[in-house]
Amino acid sequence: MKILILRLSSLGDIVLTQPIAAWLRAEYPGAQIDYVVKEQFVELVTLMGCELNPIVYSKSIRAHIALFRARYDIVIDLHGKLSTYLLKIASRGKRSVCYHKARSQRKRIVRGDRSLYIKSTTDLYKTALLQISSRVSLQAPRLYPLSHVEEPVLPDAAKRIAIFPGATHNTKRYPLKYFKELIKESPKDFQYIILGSTSEADMCRSLVLDYRTINLCAMLSFAQLLTLLQGCDWVISSDSGPMHMAAALQRPQIAIFGATHPRLGFAPQNTKAHILCANLDCQPCSLHGSDKCPQGHHRCMLSIKPESILKILSDNSN
């Protein structure tokens, strides 16, 4: 049995496919399961714990021919874009399925229909499996830190907190001035680890205020990052890929929602998650966020004060 999974990006979306891969591994224990993904996420696929074989995505004709020659029994498209459609056609699997994106439902949620709620994007991915089997039961996404990974040496702290200040779009980012207030008002024995991608280097650097803040932005591999997060008392992020990584590790976390909303299927699947969302009438204003608040006030984020975050951090011992 040979199975092909297609999900090219992005970080959070790939994490949310882990239950699909886990179900396939349990259902077809001896199968070869290949996973086509963009090069920067190859390592992430190996940390899903499902014995997956990552294949670096390429637009080249040679790459598409290689998929054709592999002769897959099942091809599962969990991206639903033109690029993966072409990969699916090229691979010519004996059975090919694509997940249901619930586009119309999500559009209605963005337009203000509060009667609708998508539990999780993973449930949408499940619709692909239901085309293969009528009996599909999925667990929450999980990631598995490696046992032997070189970790950064950090000073001891009473409470270690990871902050991911970035997000793909501005309206999903918690204000940097609020993060600075949070750090300044925190007890002296709190330690903050600032994390993010290369494109977020400047914002991460701006949060290094004193000896309690350590900037490790773009310095860690995925394996190192998982190990670091495993040792953190809390993880703070917006609705972003790192939010889903923290949830997949079942770490205590604070997830801050701005332009988007948990009802769109983006809530962290983690019983230890504290979700902060203003629930304004204008929320959500978009499916994935945008550069500017459509109404010009950005109250979805500005109304979530740093003291509410500090209260959660201080009141909950781990």
Image (cartoon, helix red, strand yellow):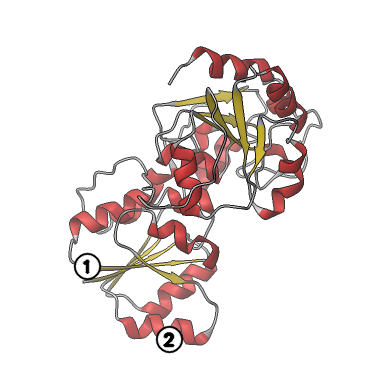
Identify the residue at horizontal 19%, vertical 61% (top origin).
28
Res 78 visible = no
Up/down of 25 relative to 142, above or below? below
C-alpha distance separating marks 1 and 2: 21 Å
Give the image location of residue 267, x and y in percent.
Answer: 48, 34
Question: Which quadrant does the C terminus fall into?
Answer: top left
Instruction: Work out whether residue 50 or residue 160 is closer to the camera in this orientation and state it.
Output: 160
Q: Amino acid at mark 2?
A: Ile
Identify the residue at horizontal 79%, vertical 28% (top origin).
297
Give the image location of residue 239, x and y in percent.
Answer: 58, 38
Up/down of 133 relative to 215, above or below? below
Identify the residue at horizontal 79%, vertical 32% (top origin).
295
Instruction: Work out whether residue 289 or residue 223 is closer to the camera in this orientation and state it.
Output: 223
Q: Amino acid at mark 1?
A: Ala
Task: Report helix, strand or loop for mark 1.
Answer: loop
What residue did someone put label 1 on?
31
Question: Which quadrant does the N terminus fall into?
Answer: bottom left
Quadrant of residue 133 within the rendered picture? bottom left
Quadrant of residue 296 within the rendered picture? top right
Is 213 left, or right, of 60 in this rendering? right
Farthest residue in the right direction?
296
Q: Nearer the viewer, mark 1 or mark 2?
A: 1
Up/down of 261 relative to 169, above or below? above
Give the image location of residue 40, x and y in percent.
Answer: 55, 63
Q: Earlier in the sequence, mark 1 or mark 2?
A: 1
Give the image location of residue 35, x and y in percent.
Answer: 39, 66
What residue did someone put label 2 on?
65
Identify the residue at horizontal 29%, vertical 57% (top origin).
50
